[in-house]
Amino acid sequence: MTVVPSTIWRTLAGRTGSDSLPQGLDAIWDVASGFLARLVPRRRRYLQRAQRVVALQDMYAEMTDAALRDVIADLWERYRCGRDEAADLVTAFAVVCEVAFRKLGERTHPVQLAGAFALTDGCIAEMATGEGKTLAAVFPAIIAGWRGKGCHVITVNDYLAQRDAEWMAPVYKMCNCRVASVVGEMQPPDRRNSYLADVTYLTNKEAAADFLRDRLALGRLDNLPSAICQRIVAGQGRGTDRLVQRGLHCAIIDEADSVMIDEAVTPLIISGEAPNPEQVEAFTQAGQLADGLDESRDFKVDRRRRDIELTSAGKRRLAELAGGLGGIWAGARRREELVTQALTARLFYLRDKQYVVQEDQIVIVDDSTGRLMPDREWRDGLHQAVSAKEQVEVQAPKDTYARISFQRFFRLYRKLSGMTGTAKEASREFWQIYHLPVVVVPTHKPCIRRQLPGRVFSSAQAKWQAVAEEIQRIHATNQPVLVGTRSVRASEHLSRMLAERGLEHQVLNAVQHEKEAQIVAEAGKKGRITVATNMAGRGTNIRLGRGVEELGGLYVISTERNDASRIDRQLYGRSARQGEPGMAQYFASLEDELLERHRPHMARLLRKRYGSDREISNTVTRKQFNRAQARAQKQALQQRKGVLRTDDWLDEYLGFAGVER
């Protein structure tokens, strides 16, 4: 592929210098500075500023629309010319508050203003579900829009990007800001026009993909000034006329933990077709050869790291099995790589968990959201190995033209901030990777959710039976229930159990976003049972139906602990929003993936001690899941750091390469 030098990346992004992870003493100092940064009393400072904004609101409430527009015009000029002062920010926020009330009918709470100040200062604002993050993001977005360099508000799917842009458009319009959205089906001219808006709503995927396409359009040019000179001399753009973005100046990221952490290790790749019939046949043959290998003798399995290693006996056995095939199978290294991938596909990638089969194709299921990702493929032949396992058509691996991980992409923005309901657990990572401090914003009303003690069972069968019984018990009282599962397979299994009991319910797993939002929004109605993958419908508020508060509010059940505690907390946060009542509880078993991967020996000891098919809830068993979760989080962080180091290496050593092989 043609690789654009790293200088042009930073020119387009508005950055210079190295953003590599610090090493040695620099790393120690970086950790220490992060600790000191957390000691700064930001929350108190932002709440005090919010009160100053509230004190100004009465003055602007008495103004006519024309007078308010004159104030906005003056502020716009100050920010556009760079003549703004610290006091102007409080004035600007007070004006936007009044505009939001006139156009949306919503009064901005002080905690929303505190979150908006945190975003303006380049922080990660933790704001609980239902606290008005969508409106809070409008304040810093308008300030960035007034500066004239553009602001990207990034969210998790096209539906939310389009919805939020349309919802907040009246506020932006009165504040002299043009707002637009970028969604998947848009053509380059429309994309270019949307990026020229003062504020652009879009997903991380669209932003990164357009960045890579622009990078490819520039070809081998060393930097942007040379591209402009070439246009002057040669009378043509040499790629600049095909760019859609105008640079990466400011980004505000909604659901920041999902976008900046959970998806951080997923590289976005621009690729093209590369027909190779021999290679396609090799993937099918690798699956057949894997059938002839025995786990106890020929290969070792590390379930914690999801790794497979062939033993010496396995390598000899494989050489015997592949002896008559010739061609690619004559080389030991390539032979072992192909078969190891086939074994990985069989042991670690399960149908209706990591993927589904649709229309004779493998479609990946996102681990953290449960959504289908039909436009993505696993790399390094893994997708083809899974296809061969399921006996569907194996497509040739595609040629990579350009790639970038999301965490590296976001670090290219000159100014970055984010908001989410769960950030404090990842505060160290937000600092180490992005140098962004976390500010925990208090709720507008105290949270009164009842967090019930977790229930632990010796077997998965006993756990699912208890979950179904609990749902039936709660449903008899008409209290709504939202059940979170980690996979499509688990949600369908529970759905069958509920159907056998005659319980009417909604199942939400990997459907289109608009329907997803509608189903989740109605989960708070009286008597409703909703079974969903853990993060489905994220970004959609669940409003309680009439009479539900008296029943105790929404009851959230988690059927399995997640690899990160903040994902558990995000699920629990779907109930008891804005001071409403609610309940949450998790169910877990010693056969759950979290324990099997990260504390397998302890799981075996506990099963031996307590027997099978019974509840074993106590302090000791609950702690095992906390420890397994801590180990999983540490391992995931190391993996994300490894991906970032790989990106740095590619940037440094392939920055001026003509072709990547």
Image (cartoon, rainbow, N blue to C red):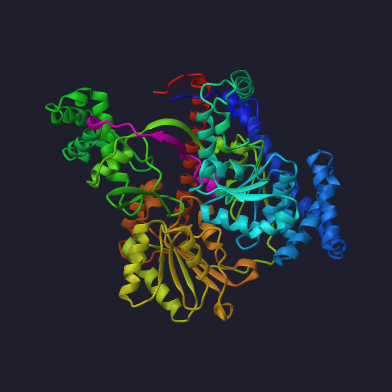
Comparing 443 with 171, the one in front is: 171
Residue 593: horizontal and vertical position, in percent? Answer: 37, 52
Q: In the rendered image, which quarter is residue 223 located in?
A: top right
Point out the image quarter for the N terminus: top left
Residue 399: horizontal and vertical position, in percent? Answer: 37, 31
Q: Is residue 267 magenta?
A: yes
Whether residue 19 is visible to the viewer of this picture, yes or no, is no
Which residue is pictured at 66% across the width and 47% down the height? Answer: 199
Q: Is residue 21 magenta?
A: no
Q: In the rendered image, which quarter is residue 245 located in?
A: top right
Comparing 584 with 16, the one in front is: 16
Left or right: residue 67 versus residue 34 is: right
Q: Which residues are magenta?
A: 258-279
Comparing 176 with 347, the one in front is: 176
Residue 342: horizontal and vertical position, in percent? Answer: 26, 38
Residue 79: horizontal and vertical position, in percent? Answer: 80, 43
Whether residue 131 is visible to the viewer of this picture, yes or no, is yes
Q: How many circles with numbers are drawn on the protein? A: 0
| Residue extending farthest front | 235
Reply above or below: 449 against 347.
below
Left or right: residue 601 versus residue 554 is: left
Point out the image quarter for the C terminus: top left
Which residue is pictured at 27% across the width and 30% down the height? Answer: 276
Q: In the rendered image, which quarter is residue 20 located in?
A: top right
Left or right: residue 631 versus residue 45 is: left
Reply above or below: 632 against 414.
below
Which residue is pictured at 84% across the width and 59% down the height? Answer: 66
| Residue extending farthest left | 324
